[in-house]
Amino acid sequence: MYSPAVRSIDYAAPIFSILISSAYRKNSLARMGLPRCGQEMMSTLRRRTRLGLPVQLTLLAFPFKVPNPAKVGGRRLPDSAELMAIRHFGALIDAIRSVYPPGLELHILHDGSLIADVFGIDLQEVRDYEVYFADLVVKEQAIDFIHCHDFHALQQRHTPLAYGSVEKLRSAAQQWWLERRGTDEWRGNFQKTLGLMNLREFPAGVVAALMQYASVGSLPEAYNNVEHRVHRAMVEYHVRDAIIHQFDPRALSFPDAIHATTQDRPGRLALWLVRRGRSLLPWHGVGCFDAEGTPHVVYDWDVCRRHDYKAEFVAQEATPFAYRKLESLAVRAARLTPV
């Protein structure tokens, strides 16, 4: 704990500057609503720093590897994409420690147990993902500043749902589905939902083609059964998303935290999870390193068939932990040629 003299320094401004810097902030300052959002963030930061406590961020993220073979291949556990995110968080925390030694606590709220069944995933797969992710946090020596929680458990503890509330949300979701059908919003939602569905019964190439076709808001007749599954999931996910945001326990669980997001939402601080300019979320893809070692998150289908990428494995695991782009012969020759 800091002495009163040190705690009298206003650390909020330099911390705030780091959080909204383009290296970490995903949304635009206008979209973020900087005047109002910034005031709220500064007040939150000051409540923590005046006590000499680590500042806090919460982030709803890392539910499970999406069960889409075109996106993640056969992987069901975190891989180097999630590892890259942990390291990116470490860089953010180091930056904050450089101006405020107590640093930052990142509270990750896993929401997989709340939404997994919508997309055809069982709860055990969600738990296996969470355990593996926690092991990565430990191996990266990040356990002192990254803390993982189950969002559904926090919600049941602080903001339990009444049966009637859920039924009202489901009725509203069904109405939304009918009224918005055929609009750009609906088609975009259809395509997004298809990408989250458990389609492991199909080859990755078929799923990749369906993802492209889904932009029109439907699928070829031969895949009517999949289309109906997507329709049901669209409605049910609309319900679960409303539950997440209307019965959000974070204000009670973490009253002095900044509640960040992975998506570009107005009035919120949105964060890059791996590196600036790359929006593909770690659980929607696989980790990949280019020839210079720069990390990326990519679709498995885009790299698994290429001869210039090498799959890398963790001992006793059957699916790749990472892909690495091989150095071309021309680049290698140029690098080795004496000047």
Image: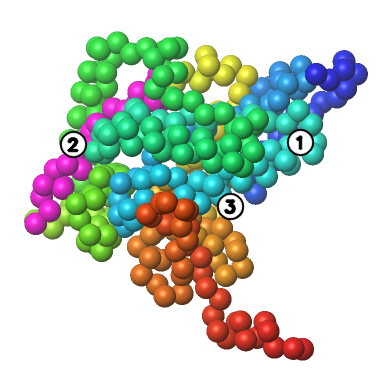
Asked whether 290 or 234 is in front, the reply is 290
Name the residue carrying label 2.
232
Kindly state the secondary structure of the residue where label 3 is placed: loop
Which residue occupies the foreground of this view, 310 or 53? 310
> Which amino acid lies under the numbered mark 1 shown in the image of this protein?
Arg
Question: Which residue is labeled 1 in the image?
Answer: 97
Q: Secondary structure at mark 2?
A: helix
Per the model, the C-alpha gap separating discs 2 and 3 is: 34 Å
Image point (77%, 89%), residue name: 339
The residues colored magenta run 222-247
**Residue 233 lies in the magenta stretch:** yes
Q: Where residue 273 sits: x, y (%)?
A: 54, 45
Q: Inspect the image, locate mark 2, and give the three-letter code of the amino acid beneath it.
A: Arg
**In the shown orientation, is residue 70 left or right of residue 232?**
right
Question: Can see residue 176?
Answer: no
Instruction: Look at the image and tell me whether residue 10 can be seen.
Output: yes
Question: Compared to 210, does 158 lie above or below?
Answer: above
Q: Earlier in the sequence, mark 2 or mark 3?
A: 2
Q: Which residue appears at 27% of the width and 34% of the height?
A: 122
